[in-house]
Image: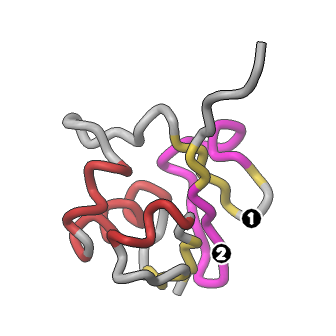
Amino acid sequence: MATVIIPTPLRKFTDNESRLSTPAANVAEALQDLAIRFPNLKKHLLDDQGQIRGFLNIFVGDADIRDLALEQTPISADAVLSIVPAIAGGRQ
């Protein structure tokens, strides 16, 4: 099963698990699987239309899904998905 790395700010919604396994075949299925298993996590991953939130960066291995097939990016059983929330702030 593919592994999803959960960022620290979202772990409170996954019973403090930092890594989760999913049998999903693509990124969309993986996020849906997490949303079903952890309902409080869903609103942090998906918008009201079920689309990946714009402030999330999703990587399969080292590749950003925006450079691949977006949410339809296939994942293998040994794939590692990383969810990386965008960070705002800084100085002007």
Q: Earlier in the sequence, mark 2 or mark 1?
A: 1
Residue placed under numbered mark 1 in the picture: 61
Amino acid at dot 1: Gly
Residue plotted at (61% across, 31% down):
88
Amino acid at dot 2: Ala
| Residue, far top | 92
Q: Which residues are magenta?
A: 64-83
Please say if 10 is above or below 44.
Answer: below
Residue placed under numbered mark 2 in the picture: 79
Crowd rating for badge 1 (residues with CA inside 10 Å; few <14, some 14–19, many 20+): few
Please say if 42 is above or below 88.
Answer: below
Please say if 11 is above or below 72.
Answer: below
54 within the magenta span? no
Q: Nearer the viewer, residue 39 or 29?
A: 39
Image colouring: secondary structure
Separation (CA) of disc 2 from disc 1: 7 Å
Picture quadrant where residue 7 is located: bottom right
Tell me: 13 left or right of 90: left
Picture quadrant where residue 70 is located: top right
Residue plotted at (54% across, 73% down):
4
Please say if 15 is above or below 58.
Answer: below
Residue 55 image point, x, y percent: 51, 35
Callout 2–callout 1 Cβ contact below 8 Å: yes
Which image quadrant: the C terminus? top right
Crowd rating for badge 2 (residues with CA inside 10 Å; few <14, some 14–19, many 20+): some
Residue plotted at (41% across, 55% down):
28
Mark 1 secondary-structure assignment: loop
Mark 2 secondary-structure assignment: loop
Residue 89 image point, x, y percent: 65, 28
